[in-house]
């Protein structure tokens, strides 16, 4: 190859190098990327946790990209270097179920926007700026002004005037409510609380409050439920009011540092026995949250747990993905001698007649059957009563925490049709941790206590009350 050919080859290489991409970056690149990401991403100083802004109505795909960008920056800061960024990790941190993010995440992988090492995802550095530019354009750029007709201008004036007239009716800010210190002290004394204890949880300035602690959790759902209950309890203690405007609640939670408030209303709607989402008049966008008596009692229990470092707050809190995931219950199986021993111990500890218990249930090493059918006015009541009686025996005698509701009713020749309808029953929600007939069902602690009480009554009278 002569000198002339060498020169031509070198020129080709220089041209082709423009197509090469690299993970290398300059300080100027970082400054530019950080400026574009700042409105959407924050990183906790101590933990390196990525927090997405709740100021924008981000789409699922944008949340995924921003979280991966934030994770990239976090690792560049030397934090969480060995933490695998799985789809479950992404789901829990952005508050969206794995089933929802799997589609866009797979699309980003196929489009070579993200890479995947084993089950850990990471964003490709050279794609970050283009993606951030698109997000900034969607959420930060001002739209081009469009021509507005005179009729539309007039309609807007009318809507604005109506909004102004109804504002005082729809929205009652917390700061306008009256605080009576004597009444407040009387309220907290009823629940064996004092001012110092309350002040350690809430920072109150006479007009409004923020939460100091008590809502830190492993997922957004738990943080949202606990912080909302605490806020509604504080609102009642300070202002003798059971409800808070939704905007005011979000403001309290945001000022308290509660993360990712975008799915707040979706998370809270799963707990109608604790709080009620009240909507305003037709055409109004104002809504409020009202705490129920049951919710208030649970809120007080949560406060006592925070103060005493106990764990009596027994509300079942699971992420949406965990709730919808079907879990198979273990088979009922026990050695015969162990079964007889457990029956004897259970009846002795709970002061139950052993012979009567054995005539109420058919105990076998590989299962059990209810020989006496509970009395009930409808199918739901019959199913719940039967599940509680059978469930406590499975837990205490067979020593198995979860069971298959359909199979256990079927074995006792009790109707197992439409078990999914039990989800709407307040007793069922209160006493059981699972809501689907195909799920592994468990008795909560209140359910265990109530079930033993019902079992004692049932053995004596062949009837029991929920």
Image (cartoon, rainbow, N blue to C red):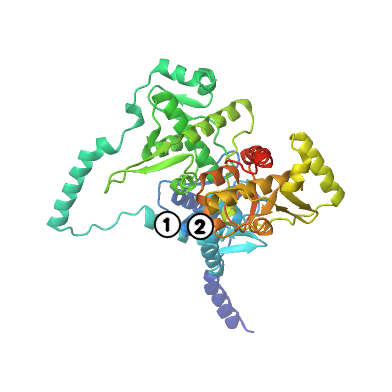
User: Dot 2: what SS?
Assistant: helix
Picture layout, residue 308 above or below residue 36: above
Q: Quadrant of residue 175?
A: top left
- Residue neighbourhood size for the residue with mark 2, other residues' Cα within 10 Å, grouped as few (<14), some (14–19), many (≥20): many
The Cα atoms of the two marked residues, 1 and 2, are separated by 9 Å
Q: Position of residue 339 (x, y in %)?
A: 82, 48
Choose between 375 and 295: the one closer to the eye: 375
Q: Is residue 73 visible?
A: no
- Pointers 1 and 2 in contact (CB under 8 A)? yes
Quarter of the image with the N terminus is bottom right
Q: Position of residue 457 (x, y in %)?
A: 65, 38
Disc number for residue 135: 1
Disc number for residue 65: 2
- Residue neighbourhood size for the residue with mark 1, other residues' Cα within 10 Å, grouped as few (<14), some (14–19), many (≥20): many
Residue at image coords 47%, 30%: 233
Residue 37 left/right relative to 457? left
Picture layout, residue 384 above or below residue 256: below
Disc number for residue 191: none
Choose between 280 and 349: the one closer to the eye: 349
Q: Is residue 107 visible?
A: yes
Q: Earlier in the sequence, mark 1 or mark 2?
A: 2
């Amino acid at each position: 190859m002569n000198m002339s050919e060498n020169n031509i080859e070198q020129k080709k290489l220089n041209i082709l190098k423009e197509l090469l991409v690299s993970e290398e970056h300059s300080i100027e690149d970082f400054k530019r990327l950080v400026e574009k990401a700042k409105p959407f991403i924050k990183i906790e100083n101590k933990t390196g946790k990525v927090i997405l802004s709740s100021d924008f109505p981000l789409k699922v795909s944008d949340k995924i990209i921003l979280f991966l960008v934030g994770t990239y920056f976090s690792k560049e800061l030397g934090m969480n270097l060995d933490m695998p960024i799985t789809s479950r990790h992404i789901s829990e941190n952005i508050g969206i179920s794995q089933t929802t993010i799997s589609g866009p995440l797979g699309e980003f992988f196929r489009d070579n926007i993200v890479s995947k090492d084993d089950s850990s995802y990471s964003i490709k550095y050279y794609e970050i700026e283009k993606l951030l530019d698109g997000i900034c354009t969607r959420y930060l750029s001002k739209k081009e002004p469009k021509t507005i007709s005179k009729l539309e201008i007039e309609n807007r004036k009318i809507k604005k005037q109506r909004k102004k007239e109804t504002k005082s009716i729809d929205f009652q800010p917390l700061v306008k409510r009256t605080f009576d210190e004597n009444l407040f002290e009387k309220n907290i004394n009823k629940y064996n609380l004092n001012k110092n204890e309350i002040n350690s949880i809430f920072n109150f300035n006479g007009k409004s409050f923020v939460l100091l602690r008590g809502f830190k959790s492993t997922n957004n759902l738990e943080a949202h439920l606990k912080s909302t209950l605490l806020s509604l309890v504080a609102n009642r203690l300070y202002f003798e009011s059971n409800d808070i405007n939704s905007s005011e609640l979000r403001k309290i939670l945001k000022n308290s540092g509660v993360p990712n408030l975008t799915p707040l209303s979706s998370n809270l709607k799963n707990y109608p026995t604790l709080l009620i989402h009240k909507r305003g008049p037709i055409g109004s966008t104002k809504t409020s949250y009202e705490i129920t008596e049951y919710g208030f009692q649970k809120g007080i229990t949560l406060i006592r747990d925070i103060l005493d470092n106990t764990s009596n707050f027994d509300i079942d809190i699971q992420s949406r993905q965990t709730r919808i995931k079907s879990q198979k219950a273990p088979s009922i199986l026990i050695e015969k001698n162990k079964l007889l021993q457990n029956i004897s111990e259970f009846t002795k500890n709970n002061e139950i007649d052993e012979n009567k218990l054995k005539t109420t249930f058919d105990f076998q090493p590989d299962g059990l059957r209810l020989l006496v059918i509970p009395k009930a006015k409808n199918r739901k009541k019959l199913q719940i009563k039967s599940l509680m009686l059978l469930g406590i025996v499975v837990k205490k005698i067979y020593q198995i925490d979860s069971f298959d509701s359909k199979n256990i009713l079927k074995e006792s020749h009790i109707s197992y049709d439409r078990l999914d309808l039990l989800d709407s029953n307040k007793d069922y929600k209160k006493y059981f941790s699972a809501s689907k007939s195909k799920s592994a069902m468990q008795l909560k602690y209140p359910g265990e206590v109530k079930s033993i009480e019902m079992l004692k009554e049932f053995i004596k009278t062949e009837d029991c009350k929920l």
